Amino acid sequence: MNVYTITLRPDVTPLPLTFHARAPVKLARALLGMDLVHVSRGRVRSGRIVETEAYLGPHDLACHSSKGRTARTEVMFGPPGHAYLFLVYGMHLCFNVVTGDGAAVLIRALAPGEGLGGLRTDGPGRLTRALALGLALNEAPLDRPPLFIARGVPVPARHVEVSPRIGVDYAGEWASRPLRFHDRRSAFVSRSPGRHSGR
């Protein structure tokens, strides 16, 4: 049997790839409240997206594509709605949604959903471990199993908090840009570095 063959609940509706074909800042906001779903060996693991960061492309010094078009970053220049997975320090796997033109959105935290059994998802490395993601899913289209983003409940603008990205001090003035978005109501965000207006 195909390890991805499973009957999903009727309310689990994968978003089309066209959903991700927008500017990275707009996608980073739009992804809040959507569900990230991984289907593996007949098991569904999912979580609600509560924190994101936008990486704007080659001109953004915190973005991987600022170093040029390489074998690793090639997927970022491809069509929107594909997965970009990479390792930090050779051990922490990070999951991103490609928007095209060298840009992507990092998923930083999830509110645990189906199949996670209390596992921590408040951080990019923790959520990929909880969902059992691997580098083999790099470049996967995100509109079908095994890995996809499903329609959820959008977070109203009044509940979206905006702040600088985390861990990009090396990027000079780009480190202070307000490109991190999270649901201020969620207990699962990776960090609360202070309040900034989200409107």
Image (tube, grey):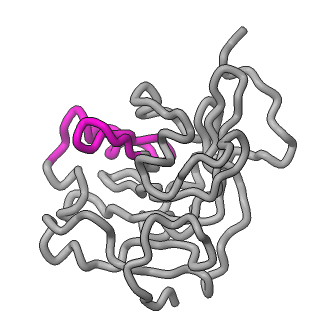
* In the image, residue 193 above or below residue 121: below
Q: In the figure, is residue 134 to the left or right of 2?
A: left
Identity of the residue drawn at 58% across and 36% down: 147
Q: In the figure, is residue 68 to the left or right of 129?
A: left
Q: Residue furthest right?
A: 10
Q: Which quarter of the figure has residue 190? A: bottom left
Q: Quadrant of the N terminus?
A: top right
Relative to the observer, which residue lies in front, 56 or 35?
35
Identity of the residue drawn at 72% across and 59% down: 152
- Residue 28 visible, this angle: yes
Q: In the figure, is residue 49 to the left or right of 134?
A: right
Identity of the residue drawn at 56% across and 39% down: 131
* In the image, residue 113 above or below residue 159: above
Q: Position of residue 143 (x, y in %)?
A: 62, 40
Q: Position of residue 166 (x, y in %)?
A: 31, 67
Q: How many marks?
A: 0
* In the image, residue 22 above or below residue 164: above
* In the image, residue 120 above or below residue 146: below
Relative to the observer, which residue lies in front, 3 or 81?
3
Identity of the residue drawn at 59% across and 70% down: 187
The stretch in magenta equals 68-94
Q: Position of residue 36 (x, y in %)?
A: 61, 48
